[in-house]
Amino acid sequence: MLAPGHHRSVTLAQSGSLILLLVLLFLLDRGAHLLYGGISFSLLAAYHLLTDYRYPPEQIRAAGLMSVHITVYLLLGTLVIWATSGEEESPYWVIYLLPVAVAATNLGLRGMLLTCSVATGLFVSFVPTGVLFGSARQEENLIEIVISCLMYFVVGVLVQTFSAQSRRQLARQQELNESLLENQAILKESLNRLEAAEDNLRRQDRLAALGEMSAGIAHEIRNPLGVISSSAQLLDRKLAEPASGIRQLLDIIQEETTRLNGLITDFLSFGRPAPPALRPIDLQEAVLKAVEHVEGMARERSVGLVAELPEEPQSALADPDMLQQVLLNLLLNALEASREGGAVALRLHRSGEALCLEVHDSGSGIPPENLSKIFNPFFTTKEKGTGLGLANAHRIIEMHGGTLGVSSEVGEGTTFRITLPRQEV
């Protein structure tokens, strides 16, 4: 495709060539009236240059002025014929080929034939009577005029045929371009799905490896961990008034053993994930129950807690305990991420054939480089986090046939989005 500047240069060169040919025609036979002939040729050349360079046929056709455009060409051509006619017919019958070519290019068959007929009538009307009747060369002159008039129709049909072929070829090219663009979009979508599937497969591989590892070592760690915890408790009871340093060490032992026990519990949930016990539940009730559990923490942190729920019940097939675990995990993360005086919003709404639950916090957001990692096991930015909470939540939602996604903007906050199939009541 030509660039706009290059296209205008080509158009100007074509118009200039045509004007040069018109000037040469005029110089070869100036006609009976030199002034009128010069003015008529100048008007025709100026109009052609103006419309061809500044107002292309597409613009004229879109404005609904194509018939007016052809009429002006016919009138200017008639002016040339009149100015160059004398005792003999005008030699510039080819001037009418301009409106004929324009009509053949931009109008249908009827419009083209009508333009040829009008051009024929106008040309014949300016043929002197003496040329047609009473001349020694009457028969020859009549044949020449008929041939000239037939040329309008021949050229019109040929130009329209070539134009139709060009339009068909252009239409096929446009269809091909649209098909290529459509295939490109499909290919891009397929590549995105493939990339998402590969990411999910890598995550599943990591989770499978984690499950195998956790199943093998969890019990081996849990038993001595329980002994350490119970021994610390017995030691605390046996010492009537332990020194402050000993009391602090015993508290540290209890705190760390409790944290390790929670970590092992998360390991086991990966190593032996139980299938969800699906049953119809009202997501509104599940959301309100989760909000009730974290209201105290929200007040302590001076963080607002808002639940935007529809009026009618929204039913979905889910395991209530597993779903509650996911909601509490997302709410606690949102509260920890929110600043004092901020807000955490829960929004439940329909999205086609699914239910969408969003948990939005007003925190500092997640850096773009971390967004693709937050559902990976052991990835955490918290000092005492295990990095298994969101990974476990992601797995639970997938086991429900839904999706758990995240969007975040640094400085604006983060939104986690749960999508579950809707259950008709």
Image: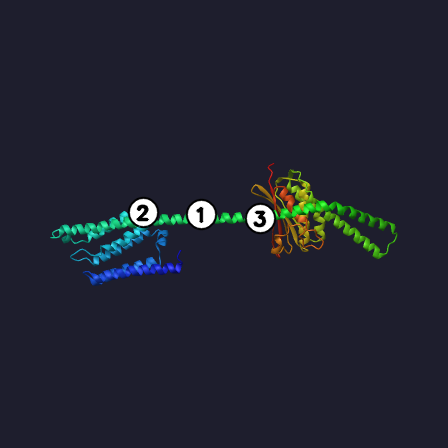
Distance of label 1 from label 2 (alpha carbons) = 28 Å
- Where disc 1 sits, the SS reads helix
Q: Nearer the viewer, residue 288 or 56?
A: 56
Q: Nearer the viewer, residue 63 or 91?
A: 91
Q: Nearer the viewer, mark 3 or mark 2?
A: 3
Q: Nearer the viewer, residue 64 or 419?
A: 419
Distance of label 3 from label 2 (alpha carbons) = 53 Å
Crowd band around label 1 with a 10 angstrom C-alpha radius: few (<14), some (14–19), many (20+): few
Q: Compared with residue 73, is residue 284 higher up or lower down, i.e. above or below? A: above
The residue pinned by badge 3 equals 196
- Where disc 3 sits, the SS reads helix
Quadrant position of the N terminus in the picture? bottom left
Pointers 3 and 2 in contact (C-beta within 8 Å): no
Amino acid type shown at disc 3 = Ala
Q: Compared with residue 37, is residue 148 higher up or lower down, i.e. above or below? A: above
Residue 332 spot, x, y in % from top left: 69, 50
Q: Nearer the viewer, residue 243 or 267?
A: 267
Amino acid type shown at disc 1 = Ser
Q: Nearer the viewer, mark 1 or mark 2?
A: 1
Identify the residue at horizontal 64%, vertical 45% (top origin). 395
Tell me if 222 is positioned left or right of 240 in this view.
left
Residue 57 spot, x, y in % from top left: 34, 54
The residue pinned by badge 2 equals 108
Q: Which mark is residue 179?
A: 1
Pointers 1 and 2 in contact (C-beta within 8 Å): no
- Where disc 2 sits, the SS reads loop
Quadrant position of the C terminus in the picture? top right
Amino acid type shown at disc 2 = Gly
Query: Of marks 1 and 2, which one's residue comes earlier in the chain?
Result: 2
